[in-house]
Each structure stands twice: as structure tokens, then as C-alpha cells.
Amino acid sequence: MPDALAPYLDEPVRFAYWVSNLSGGQVVSQIEQRTSWDFDYNVKLARAAEKAGFDFALSATRFVGGYRADGQHEASTFAMSLLNATERLNVIVAIMTGFWHPAVVAKIGATADHISKGRWHLNIVSGWFKHEFDVLGVPWLDHDERYRRSTEFIKVLKGIWTEDELTFHGDYYNIDRWHLNPKPTFKPHPLIFQGGSSTAARRMAAEHSDWYFTNGGSVEELRSQALQVKTGAAGFGRRLRVGANAFIIARDTEAEAREVHAEILAKADPAAVAGFAEAVKQAGQATRDGVGNWAKSTAADLVQPNDGFKTNLIGSPEQVALRILELKRNGIDLVLAGFLHFHEEVDYFGRRVLPLVRELEAEAARRAPVLA
């Protein structure tokens, strides 16, 4: 076991789910999706996820619709409402750095942290959809430059949250002796998640973020990413945790689960999938080294826009639990879950899958060698 992965094995794998604040569901398919993006549905879902044992909920950000997501609730406002409706669930707010000033986010975050008693956290989104920027007149930067701006954004956030008075002069942000009071209660600051799989994203995560989110992938692909970013973080004297996207189809038998997956693909919306495929050429496929989200995704992969099928959490509760443990052994610390029918499937996951994961973790801990 490489040293960069071993230190995390004594921690339980965490679970997050996608908040349904965008319309269209989690798959680009005409299959029935008993999932709603209205507020009342999401309050019930947050409470159900909390009861089921989920640690985090991720509220997504989008400013332009399309690909069956033509409606969007604003992420930070929606997240605060869900925090008020729950007691233990942590909510991660996606913030697209090109549309926000870090001091504004720092102040919102500190207030939300106090209201929620430390359950507000942040997902830094550097942006991949050029049309989203064009229609709002926001300058579109080169891929690596967007991550350089996000790096400055994180530096300013951390400085505001941890220093008594911040002065910062960069290429994108300039702060002169600014003091924030109150500071967040979560120490040293609210958790900073970030997305992306490109070389620039991995470099930023290793040096600055607490959590690194990546699209779904095979065990081998995810292990390679996890090893790279955790080794990079260790070089800076830091620990970095990794979350992977997964579309979970857990049914009583593998045959039932595979049948659902097959139906999703059979009823895929070809025009929407093709449109999404064209849009994501600006992401991983446009990087200089061809590394990043969607760089090697097929049309079948893109029916779940974040490559969730690739992670292969499809099968019986026992099979899904075993695969989650395999992901954990290969450097994945959190599973970011999407479901076809959120309410009933979150409940099913909490009753049938998550207890098996904890049993397998306990068994693995008992079998671990005792180091003198």
C-alpha cells in the first residue's frame, strides 16, 4: 500500500448526495425519475439523508440551463434553507469563482457557519461551460488561468477566515487591511472542496484544498488520481481527501439493478446527450495535456453527466458495499451519490447498503496488522 493512501484507511468512508436544486434529474434520459427540484421535496430529502447516515449534501451551481436542467435554484440560498431544516447534515455550497468576490463569500460563509453551528462548507468551481460566461458578459479565461484565479480565491478566503486583518495583492483580487468579525466557528476554517480532474485542478487541490472532487471512473482511474493528489499534498505537508462521483443503483438483486441501468441507457435523450458532449469539449478535452473531466467519456457515460456509471456502484446491497470498500482501499474517502428516485433510494441505501459498509470497515480494521 503506497504511503500516500495508507494514512486514510482508519477513517470511515463518507457519503454525500447531490442536492436536487437543478431541474431534469440525475440522468439525461426519458426514464421516469421520481425526483423533484422544488424546495419542499429537498427539505424532506435532506432530513431523510441525515437519518440514513449521509454526512454531506452538495448544492450545485448553474447560471444557464440546458441538457434537461433548464431550471436552477441558487446554490447558497438553497443550502442555507436546508441547513435550517436539519440538525447534523453538512451542506457544501458550490461557488463559481468567476461570478463572486471571495470577500463576499467569506462573509456569507461566516454567517452561515454561525447559524448552522459549523455545518456550512464550500465547493470551489472554476467553470467549464463557456456559454455560461458569455451570456452574462463575464470574461472567459484560459483553462489553467481559471484555476489560477481559483487559487487566489482560496488564498483570500483562508486569509479572511484565519487572519485578524488581511492584506492581499494578486492578479485577480486586492484586499487592503480588511477584518472580518465574526470568524467562522469551524476551525481552522470551513472545509474547502474543489472539483476537476485536470492537471491544473490536481495541482491546486494538492496545495490548497481540503477535499478533491473528481468525476466517476474505474477503480484504476480513481486510484491513479487519488495517489497523485495525495502524494502532492504530502509534499506540502498537508492531508487531502478525495471524493468520487457515483450514480448508485442498488436493488435487491444484481439483475434488477442492471435492468434499471439498461433502461436508463435505452431511453437516453440522444439530442441532449450530444449537446452535452459538444459542450464538455471545452473541459478536459481542451486542456493542453488532454487530462480532465470528460476527456475520455463515451456517449453512454454522458447519460449521467458526471460519469457516475463509470464508478460501477450498480448491483445488490452486498455488491455495492464491497465496491465502496474497494474504492476506499484505493484512495477514495467519500462517495458523492446520485440516484434515480432520491427519496426512496436514499432510504434504501441507508437501510441496506451503509450498514454493510460499516461492517466491512470494522472487519477490515480487525484484520489490519498491529504495528509495534
Image: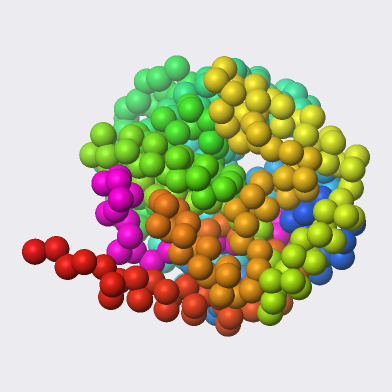
Is any atom of residue 76 visible in this view?
no
Compared with 150, 330 (above or below) is: below
Query: Is 367 or 72 nearer to us in this picture?
Result: 367
Nearer to me, 16 or 254: 254
Residue 119: image location, x then y, percent: 45, 62
Q: Quadrant of residue 129?
A: top right
Residue 11 is at least partly visible in this image: yes
- Magenta span includes 265: no
Quadrant of the image containing the C terminus: bottom left
Question: Does 22 lie within the magenta span?
Answer: yes
How far across and down, in percent of the image, does residue 359 sit?
42, 78
**Residue 320 placement (x, y as % from top left):** 58, 68
Residue drawn at x 58%, y 46% is 217
* Residue shown at 89% from the left, 55% from the top: 267
Task: Please give the name of the residue rendered at 40% of the width and 57% of the height, measured from the top-left corner.
Answer: 329
Most foreground residue, 60 or 327: 327
The magenta segment is 1-23
Q: Quadrant of residue 317?
A: bottom right
- Position of 300 with respect to 106 (left or right) is right
Q: In the current view of this chain or complex, which residue is farthest to the left? A: 372
Q: Is residue 57 left or right of residue 121?
A: right
* Residue 69 x/y as whole percent: 80, 48
Asked if residue 88 lies left or right of residue 165, the reply is: right
The residue sitting at 56% across, 28% down in the picture is 291
Q: Is residue 116 above or below residue 226?
A: below
